[in-house]
Structures are given as structure tokens and as C-alpha cells.
Amino acid sequence: MSRKHDDLRRRFISLEAKILANESPDDSTVTVWCSERLAIESDEPPTYKALDLLCENEQALATGEKRRVEMGTFPILTAQLSRWENVKFKVVQTQL
């Protein structure tokens, strides 16, 4: 997995370098860049949904947002082990 992550990171950095090197791209160049980005993203492994939502909750707390995702104890404890792909978590408003 670390090798895969390193490969994806290098490909995104390479794409970023191409974008930054071109100050005024035309539409066809932007289309090529979008296609390359989608090709990179298609090689990414599936997201660990519960882990991703835990991170969103932490960011919301840190930035003072009043929205968070309500999760049970079991998804929190297994967020790094299970992808929780077919589970719908409830979005709630908090009072800060």
C-alpha cells in the first residue's frame, strides 16, 4: 500500500508541475489535465468511509462548524479496518 501511495503522490506532483508550468493553458490542455487527474484517481484504493468521516468531524470541530456526522462506537473503533461502504451515517447540527 505504501508503494501504491508513493506512486499516486508522484503522479499528482507531476501533474501539478505541468499545470504550474503553463501560465495560460488552452481548453484542450485543460481537458488533457482533467483526463490525467481522473486516470490517477481511478487507480486510488477505495476510501475508508468511517475514517474519512472521523477526519471531517475533527476538522469541523477545529474550524467551529456546527455540522458533524453522527457515528456509533463500533464504526469509530473499526474505522481503519473496515470500509463501511454501504452504511449511511447521519449528519447532525451541533450547538457550539
Image: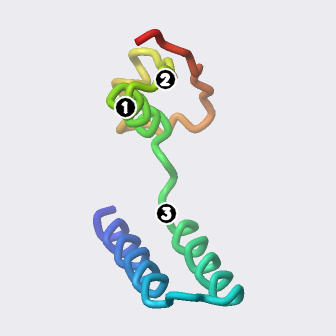
> Horizontal and vertical percent for residue 51?
40, 36
First in sequence, mark 1 or 2: give its number. 1
Q: Is residue 37 left or right of residue 11?
A: right
Q: Which mark is residue 44?
A: 3
Amino acid type of the residue tagged 1 in the rendering: Thr
Q: Nearer the viewer, residue 17 or 41?
A: 17
Reading the image, the residue beneath label 2 is 68
Q: Nearer the viewer, residue 82 or 35?
A: 35
Name the residue at 37% across, 31% down.
63
Q: Is residue 57 left or right of residue 91?
A: left
Task: Answer few, some or many: residues within 10 Å of disc 2's Cα (few below 14, many 20 plus, some between 14 and 19).
Answer: some
> Horizontal and vertical percent for residue 73?
39, 15
First in sequence, mark 3 or 2: give its number. 3
Label 2 secondary element: strand
Task: Answer few, some or many: residues within 10 Å of disc 1's Cα (few below 14, many 20 plus, some between 14 and 19).
Answer: few
Task: Answer few, some or many: residues within 10 Å of disc 3's Cα (few below 14, many 20 plus, some between 14 and 19).
Answer: few
Q: Is residue 76 left or right of residue 33?
A: left
Reading the image, the residue beneath label 1 is 63
Of the two numbered discs 3 and 1 in the rendering, the one whose residue sits closer to the viewer:
1
- Where is 50 relative to 89, above or below? below
Q: CA distance from mark 3 to mark 1?
A: 28 Å
